Image: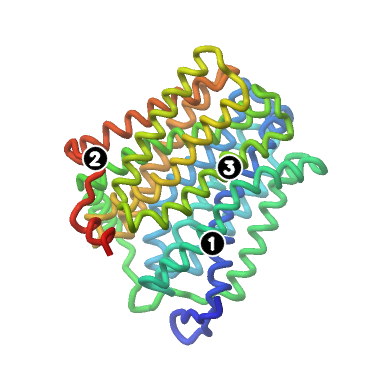
Amino acid sequence: MSAAIKPAGDSPAMSLGELVALLVAMTAVVALAIDMMLPALDEIAADLGTAHANDRQYVITTYLLGFGLAQLIYGPLSDAYGRKPVILGALGLFLVATLACMFAQTFEALLLARLLQGSAAAACRVIATAIARDLTSGRRMAEVMSMVMTVFMAVPVLAPGLGQLILFYLPWQGVFGFLFLFALGLVLWLHFRMPETLHPEYRQKLGLGSSVRAFAEAMTTRLMLGYTLAGAAFFSGLYGFLGSSEQIFAEHFQLGDRFPLAFAGIAFGMGLTSYANSKLVMRWGQRRLSHGALIGFTVISVVHSAVLMSGVDNLAVFMVLLAAAMALLGLIGANFSAIAMEPVGHIAGTASAAYGFVTGVAASLIGALIGQLYDGTAIPLVTGQALMGALAIVIVLVTERGRLFENHEGEAAIADT
């Protein structure tokens, strides 16, 4: 971790350790603003008042919607104006939105602030990847991003517990207060330690026409379109879980403030398989892993749905089956994204933003629908996940012209090395 990373211009080199820590902090903002909120949803609904019990889920889904919508913006902006001013501006917007959340007097005002907060947080994910690409390449970049993701996997495990700990001493506004202080510390760190990483000769002119043409090319490419739509389908099941998990665990299974422990168990499985994917993909290939995991996710969800409908509804069975299904998502997400990007490497920035935009917006809307179907049982969530998994399988089958598990020529060459 002592290697030096040389930024653009004459700025001093950063240590590899500091670069990884900074990128972890940037990406952690995104997850903390989701997972820390989960234990506070009931208190927020009681304090601000909601027309329906399920409306509390909108605190999560509006953030996810803003996060998806804004991803198209930050890539072109940072390519034109540099990474540092854009990320600092976005974090400034995040701070304003977080304060608006803290002082919201109505539920509608809170949702509007959360939409803005998610839109600002999208810059952290987009620009963190861009900074890693600016400062590193090849195996070094893979090493950096692997270390970032390894540490980042702990966030969904720890964040709900941290949110619950805050709620033991402070009202729900205290969770937003923590997010504000965390983001403020990140702003100061970026301002004083992170140099501009985009070399001047690599800056691009900001043009709507060229961006639209690149977006259209990406979304009319068969692999890109197919795996983007399939990604939106299976992510919908994840977003539905994020929206309704607090009600299912805290209310239906009566865990109360122990809910973060159950959520951590699910998140830990997903993190474990995400790490395993980085080790297995070079041997087995992206399609074998992701196609097998998608089928497994769908089969488990169908079985789980049948078990629930038969009247078997206890926490132990629910945790085992849901954890098994959700863990397989760690073998799908990164691989679907990589497959989608295979034919559009010449417009990788726009294509990556397009993938995040389409999957994020579609999944947040469908996930919100799944969450709103919550009826006091886990049946709507698990059935929704089964249906979305089946839809993703159909989309992948059409995209791959009926052939599953087959490595393409380029992927097979990688897998055999």
Q: Quadrant of residue 255?
A: top right
Q: Picture coordinates of residue 211 (x, y %)? A: 29, 56
Query: What residue is pinned by disc 3?
Result: 114
- 37 over 305 or under it: above or below: below
Q: Is residue 185 left or right of residue 326?
A: right
- Labelled pair 2, 1 in contact (Cβ < 8 Å): no
- 146 over 355 or under it: above or below: below
| Along the line of sight, the residue nearer the viewer: 225 or 387 | 387
Q: Tell me the quadrant of the picture where the C terminus can be found.
A: bottom left
The local secondary structure at tag 2 comes to loop
**Crowd band around label 2 with a 10 angstrom C-alpha radius: few (<14), some (14–19), many (20+):** some
The local secondary structure at tag 3 comes to helix
Amino acid type assigned to the residue bearing label 1 in the image: Gly
Residue lying farthest top?
Answer: 310
Q: Is residue 81 visible?
A: no
| Along the line of sight, the residue nearer the viewer: 47 or 54 | 54
Amino acid type assigned to the residue bearing label 2 in the image: Leu
Q: Picture coordinates of residue 166 (x, y %)? A: 76, 45
| Along the line of sight, the residue nearer the viewer: 323 or 18 | 323
Q: Picture coordinates of residue 413 (x, y %)? A: 22, 61
- What residue sits 31% from the left and 50% below the top? 286
Numbered label attached to residue 89: 1
- What residue sits 50% from the left and 25% below the top? 381
Query: What residue is pinned by disc 2?
Result: 404
